[in-house]
Amino acid sequence: MSKVKDKSLVDFSEIQLREIFTKAGLNSQDIDKAIADYMRYRESELSSLSILSYKDLQSLGADAFTEEVFKLRQGGEIVEEILRAYLRYINYKKQIAETYQESKSWDKVITTAVYSDVYEAQEAFIDYVEEVYKTKVKDAKHLQKLTGITEETLEGLEETVINSRYSKYFRALERALQEGAKYKDLLQIKPQDYGLPKTWSGCLGSDQYSSILWALSFEFLIDEPASLMLLPDLRSIAQEIQAPYSVLMDCYNLINKGKKYGATGD
């Protein structure tokens, strides 16, 4: 079943965030910016630029965000994973910023610090480019014009842009489910609002429907390898999110590549 229904259990309070960022090594004057940036990340905001600058990121020590920080969590696994995801994003962004500041070469950045199979790294890259040039990246051609990158093809840059946008869109789906969203609510989270086309390639999902199916699989553990013994009952999940049963069947078949859903789970 869904792991969280209470919105108060899917995020940190401002007091907790202040303690977390203090322990992470941020200067007191930068903590407000760090909290605002965390909220921007959690809300998957597209309109605003990232808030933490290279100078701010530099103040994060090498041992920032140690296990000690996670003692502050109030909602168990979900809250811990929410923060871990943000910290992974910040660490990628810090690596990208350091690489660029040391080399002043976006080619160096794209070939050494941006991982093609890591959405968070690509999101951090696009966010940092936008921060440096104080403008939103429109598409691959715009990204190439801003950065002068020659070590990556236009197709590769387009994939990076798409993946960065997908990262924000998929996070919005995950957060909605964590907060108890129903299927009809997920349908209102439009990929186009995140700069995605109607269909795309290179990501978990290739359109709105398949992305929703993947989000459901993660939230309700349908992707777990333990198979039918531990698989949540699909009809119960369908009832909980008020979705047609066929949606959960599509989800199971997508994740399991056509394996039969046995009688023990139906």
Image (tube, helix red, strand yellow):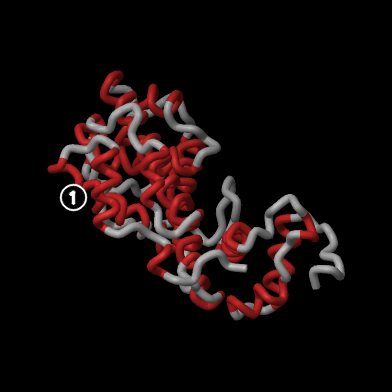
Mark 1 = which residue?
32
From the top left corner, tell me how far across and down residue 33 is, in percent.
20, 48
In the image shown, does 229 or 266 lie closer to the viewer?
Answer: 229
Note whether 82 is above or below 191 in the view shown. above
In the rendered view of the protein, which quadrant contains the C terminus?
bottom right
In the image shown, does 53 or 27 lie closer to the viewer?
Answer: 27
Location of residue 9 (image quadrant): bottom left
Q: Name, please, the residue furthest toward the top.
A: 103
From the top left corner, tell me how far across and down residue 91 is, in percent.
38, 35
Note whether 261 is above or below 55 in the view shown. below
Location of residue 151 (image quadrant): top left
**Badge 1 amino acid:** Asp
Q: Residue at x 75, y 52 (%)?
A: 226
Q: Name, please, the residue furthest toward the left.
A: 29
Q: Residues within 10 Å of mark 1 (few under 14, many from 20)?
A: some
Disc 1, SS: helix
In the image shown, does 24 or 104 lie closer to the viewer?
Answer: 24
Q: Residue at x 58, y 45 (%)?
A: 202
In the rendered view of the protein, which quadrant contains the N terminus?
bottom right
Left or right, 256 with respect to 212, comes to right
From the top left corner, tell me how far across and down residue 95 is, in percent.
36, 29
Q: How many marks?
A: 1
Left or right, 262 with respect to 194, comes to right
